Image (cartoon, rainbow, N blue to C red):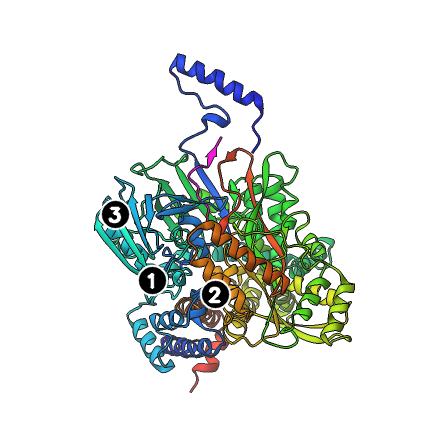
Amino acid sequence: MAQYLLRRTIILIVSLLVAMVIIFLLLRALPGDPANALLSINATPEQVAAARAQVGADLPVHEQMVRWFGSMLTLDLGSSFVSTLPVGPEIASRLSVTIPLTFLAFGLALVLSLVIGFVAAYRADRWYGAALSAFSQLFIAVPAFWVGILLISMFSLNLRALPAGGFPREGWSDPGATLTHLVLPVLTIALVMAGSLSRYVRSATLDVMGSDYLRNARALGSTMGTAMVRHGLRNGAVPVISILGIELATTFLGAVVIEAVFALPGLGSMLLKAIAQHDYPNIQGILFVSTLLVLIVGFIADVVQRLIDPRLRQRTSSS
Amino acid sequence: MKKHPWSTLAAGTLAAAVAISGLSVAVAAQDSNPDATIEIGSLYEPQNLDNTAGGGQGVTEAFDGNVYEGLFHLTDTGEVEPLLAASYTMSDDGLTYTFTLQPDVTFHSGKALTSEDVKYSIERVFAPESQSARKSSFGAIESIETPDPQTVVVTLAEPSISFIYNLSYVWVVNKDATDLTTSEDGTGPYVLDGWTRGNSLSLKRWDDYWGEPAKNGEVVFDYFTDATALSNALLTGAVDIVTNMQSPDALAAFEGDPNFVVNNGTSTTKEILVFNDRVAPFDQVEVRKAIYSAIDRAKLLNAIWGDKGTLIGSMVPPTDPWYIDLVDENPYDPELSAQLLADAGYPDGFEFTLDTPTYDPHPVVAEFIKSELAKIGVTVDINPITADEWYTKVFQKHDYEATLQEHVNDRDVVWYGDPDFYWGYDNPQVTAWIAEAEQATSVEEQTAKLKLVNEQIAKDAASAWLYLYPQLVVASADVSGYPVNGLNSMFPAYDIVKG
């Protein structure tokens, strides 16, 4: 196991480095010029040249890359071309919105999908099982921002029960206000995520219910409940965990639309703005952090799967 | 904002009662909360805090007049008034300006304002590394001298009638200040209290301000990226004012609601169908006039903005001193268009590519133009391009036939005097008039010359100016004292009262 962990960690680091090189080169290959974003229509060619020199965009690409990797080793993510503010602290401040948003939404989606998926499968023959199945279909079909707008319309504009968006200036030093502002966005993301996750839970449950080992366990005297928990759970969990990993990873940046609808200063909106302005340090910094998060989540998902399923351990550890 | 007569009477009576009783009582409208926090919703977040280092429209909105002041200041109706320059004189040849500064002015850091700071502030606008949009306006400055701490003498190489107006855009900053992109040191009625990127920027009233203190205690600019989210914030009371309501559809929620006031001000943003005047067939005046007269602009404006916005017939908006109503110079007349096209040698019409920026409202305008021009046999190929591509392809390389663009600044008719500007309008008479206007010795002379320019470019249909954007400042009904015209994105907040 330790060997596996070590190998996986090395793969993680190498993946990260390769991703960063690709991102760096792709950005430079795209049409458009960072200097243009900084200046207005009235800019003279001298101003454009000066702006490019200022941000180091006039150096050859390999030199820029060496500089950037060098600063990364000291964990210095550089400064924005546009605002001249350091990238790291701004990302940290945006993460203080995006990470709680993502994890709270994810937690809620998990609970909802486990309940809905399980009941939809286990009681597929009853009316409420079928109804839950249809319900999850509905939430796969609707776009997240539409759910968000609907919730705002209902709870903020009509009932005036919750704020229509925004994030308190004081941030987490006032957790009550912050959580109130996160209720609707979390609910929006969770409902839509639960729609698709519950389908996976449902199909995993159905697989387990129709499996030989479950039938054997019951034949040997277990009740349905005990058999499901003792044998079914670990088997059913494996595919669901890989999906969970992917969903969590995509939500970090995928929440950009929700951030716009609810006016949340999260990572997604920072990335969107940085891309429009060709703000390379910001883009690279954000993609570095999110790539790292995605790789870590994938790493944890893989490790958990191996812990649950002994067959995975055997397959790869044999020489 | 309307005040009901009874509230004035009540306020007067209560004021008397207050004077007698010696108690302070909060009353409606007149004696509103002087320490109120005003929340302002905007779509324009500053890029950074320095308008010579790419701060952008957002920093002008938040800081101009609030945190930083200039020697002069541009009012909401477009007039130039003295501010930090208490008075000034101009020599007879128009080359030397002597400014006397306001006495006893200090920066937020406590340092006293001197002429050295003013010299430094002007020089940083046209310094080589400056990214200020106003950099080229100061090309005529030869030297700036500071004979004593209260006096600044500027010598120009040639007369420049717009010099005083241009100075209203120059922030007077403390020459010893550092990190002006992330902090500030100005002389204005507010200090920067905090800036959470992507979220909000707050200004706090400064008690040592040299002039009249701000009428509110704190001003917070809340930033949004989505126009609907901004509308919702106003509807739920999360913000008190929206500086520029972007979508006409959003207005419906506020019009007719007594809790809100919709202010229909004038802006200086013009939506223009720009011809590349160097390229056939747009190098012919008749062709340009034909295209211009084939577009029903009233219908276009109505389709996008309903009863808001203004029609224009030239580059000059109503707030510029040289405005003339030229809307009917090239009237909507498809028969005239057909006639002009035939005269120009295109009786069967022609085809051209319209490079259309992908952001609102250009795609909608492009579709409208396409269908209007189809009626006179002109085929339009819409080519969507990003803002970036537009800058390189159209603005720098002039590689286009026609394009759509919005031009935001006031007093920008002078671009028609530069044949190398992207639209390539080359009329030596107009160029001469513009140069003479700048060297005029009086505002009247300048105005007269620029009016000639205004008429000429309309006659020549140098471009097809479609309409002027409305400036819709929507606010909650208990707030007053805010600017409604939004000239050049400024939003001075010191007169806003709540209650």
Chain ID at mark 1:
B
For label 3, the SS is strand
**Residue A267: x, y in percent?**
46, 60
Please say if the residues under marks 2 and 3 sit with CB atoms less than 8 Å apart. no
Q: Amino acid at mark 2?
A: Ile
Identify the residue at the far left of this view: B148
| Residue at which label 2 appears | A41
Chain ID at mark 3:
B
| Residue at which label 3 appears | B151
**Residue B414: x, y in percent?**
50, 61
Q: Which numbered tag is attached to residue B157? A: 1
Chain ID at mark 2:
A
Stretch of the chain drawn in magenta = B491-499
Considering depth in this image, is A113 or B125 the residue closer to the camera? Answer: B125
Q: Residue at x 54, y 75 (%)?
A: B398
On the question of residue A220 being in view, the answer is: no
Q: Amino acid at mark 3?
A: Thr
Q: Quadrant of residue B107?
A: top left
Quadrant (top left, top right, bottom left, bottom right) of the N terminus of chain B: top right
Q: Residue at x 49, y 58 (%)?
A: A102
Nearer mark to the viewer, of 2 and 3: 3
Q: Residue at x 48, y 36 (%)?
A: B481
